[in-house]
Amino acid sequence: MSAERLLEHIARNARSEPDAEAFIFLRGDGLERRFSRAEFQALTDSWASTMRASGLGRQDRLAIALPNGPHAIAAFLAALRLGSWPALLPSSLVRGGEEAFVRRTLGLSRQARLRLVVASPADAHLLERPLREVGCGLLSEPGRSADLPASPTEADPKLDEVAYLQLSSGTTGRQKAILMPGDGVARHLDDYSRFLGVSDRDVVTSWLPLFHDMGLMAGALLPLWNGIPAVILTPQEWVRRPALLLEALHRHRGSLTWMPNFAFAHCVRGVHPRQIQGLDLSCLRVATNGSEMVRPATLEAFTESFLPRGLRPEAVTPGYGMAENTMAISSTLPGAPPRVDWIRRLPLQAEGRAVPEEPGRQRVSGVASCGPPIPNVDLQIVDEKGEPLPERRVGEVRLRSPYLFVGYLDRPDLTEQAMADGWLRSGDLGYLADGEVHLTGRIKDLIIVGGRNIYPEDVEEAACQATGLRSGRLAAFGVEDEAAGTESVVLVVEAGGTARAGAPALEAAIRRAVWDDCELALREVRFVPVGWIEKTTSAKVARGANREKYLAETARSSPNIEPSVGGAAGSSGMFP
Amino acid sequence: MLDRAAVARQLREYVCRELLRRPPESIGPYDRLVSGGYIDSFGLAQLGLFIEEAFGVALDDADLARPEFDSLNEIADLVLQRGGAVR
């Protein structure tokens, strides 16, 4: 069993102080459910015996599609004990409701050849019939075992180091599942916790979904590893009431939290001053901003908004991470305030050089430092040929560490593409300055919307299916949404005269399809004349070039608006 | 006196200006904003806050999750039901 070290460590914490608080699960209506370490071990025991009695075994693949709560974490740990490979998935409570839930869960069960799905009693009835048809088992409560159908996969001794599957992105049927190394995860928890100086006085507070890599690490594994309490909210309640997080931090004296940049912006925009009167946030020690580009404007707005509530400016901690490296790659040092590197925009765009400049001058961009690599992570910036670049030169970020992923499930081709001479190619562009990582853009076409990875081809595919248009006549790309502190997705569609007459209906069909397939609201569907879309020499859609063209046209049609996002990191010019 | 059309108009202005960034006439009173893929859960949260501020009504989580909380007219009806008033 590859998660041995992790599980033993958690069990030891429970034995040493069985009555210490492990989790407090909060609900929007103020109810809370508390678990001591011993109680949580007991819940895990009960899931483990149910799974064992059902016949779940080594390297069997299963999805745990439960709401953010005790059962999701306990069932996950129970599956690790059996040496099976759990993947956490959203329940029907998030994104798209029941229909999307069934499509998503079934899609994964087919694609990853799951032996079992664990769903809440409320969701289980939706899956009973369709799962039976594909020969996949279903559990909904600890204590109620079921005879699982025979395992559709065989154990592979070469993959014994794998502990679980982390889904990173992709639509139904095309999910990318990362094979996570058990020992690597334990080692990462150890290294990263030391880096942050985690002590028994710390309290984690998290609203992140547990199916998100940062949510699982921050909300469950890191607190369990360190034996510190975690206060867990649900993402759907937090989205509607971002003040819930601030109230929870105040009430439970939360000292550690993690969230993507957009969530910091959502706290600023979505919280009314009267909701946070009297709160004291001075307990917050590390609020990590990670999992999407850190925007300097968001850092500033967040600090300014909550300074009067006792927020310490140095608590805001920009970081850089990837599930392929378990979680963190680099992070600002705890106790150090966030740093913004002000650089001249033109040398950056023209030559990939980060030349320092006084802030406030013309054509200056601020790039947030994501801090130095954490100990045991080797990081390089390389040019197109893979040659290391000196400081302040922009290139691809590559890394090596003891916690790199094992590969992508059933996709050796993707695994091979991701690696170069033992280094992980991040697909991110950035530079080093004083040894600290600064991200400026991306080589890969990936779009990150609110910390969620979206592939433009998935959006284009959904729109093609809905409209019957050929694939080369659509281009999806991300544009900066400054107010929301994240990216939003634009779809450009080539439509001839007849199609344009029906544009409103076409747009409605496209939006509906993209919503259904990708659970994404498009920022704009723009119809353009045939021939508008730029192609590469190999006749593929050149998404970067189309993005530039779109931004230039937008700027021309409304000259007062600067389309390229005011020059924060991630602004258009930083894409090659 | 606040009527449905007035509420819907005010909602439309906010949705188009703040959430969609497009001209107000581009959204009709019956267009499905949520299930039609125009606004996501974050947009919905912003809209909820706007409604509470602008019309002085309290909405709970269940209101925003209702499938009928979708078109401008439907949302306007809910605002009126709750006794919304222009502030």
Image (cartoon, rainbow, N blue to C red):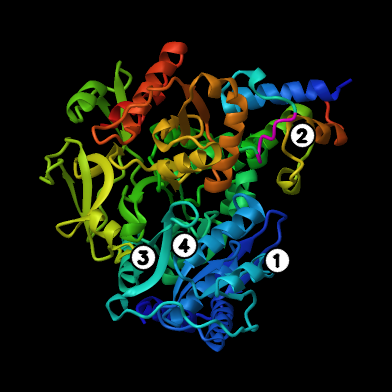
Residue that protrudes farthest toward the right in the picture: B1
| Element under disc 4 | helix
Q: Are marks 3 and 1 in contact (CB under 8 Å)?
A: no
Q: Are marks 1 and 2 on the same chain?
A: no
Residue tagged by mark 4?
A: A216
Residue tagged by mark 3?
A: A409
Magenta residues (range): B30-35
Q: Nearer the viewer, mark 4 or mark 3?
A: 3
Q: Amino acid at mark 1?
A: Ala
Measured from the top left, where is residue A267 in percent x and y?
A: 55, 40
Q: Nearer the viewer, mark 1 or mark 4?
A: 1
Give the label on residue B75, or none: 2
Which chain's residue wears label 4? A
Measured from the top left, where is residue A519 in percent x and y?
A: 55, 46
Q: Amino acid at mark 2?
A: Ile
* Of callouts 3 and 1, the N-terminal one: 1
The quarter of the displayed image where residue A185 is located: bottom left
Q: Amino acid at mark 3?
A: Leu
Q: Nearer the viewer, mark 4 or mark 2?
A: 2
Residues at marks 4 and 3, CA–CA distance in whole angstroms: 19 Å
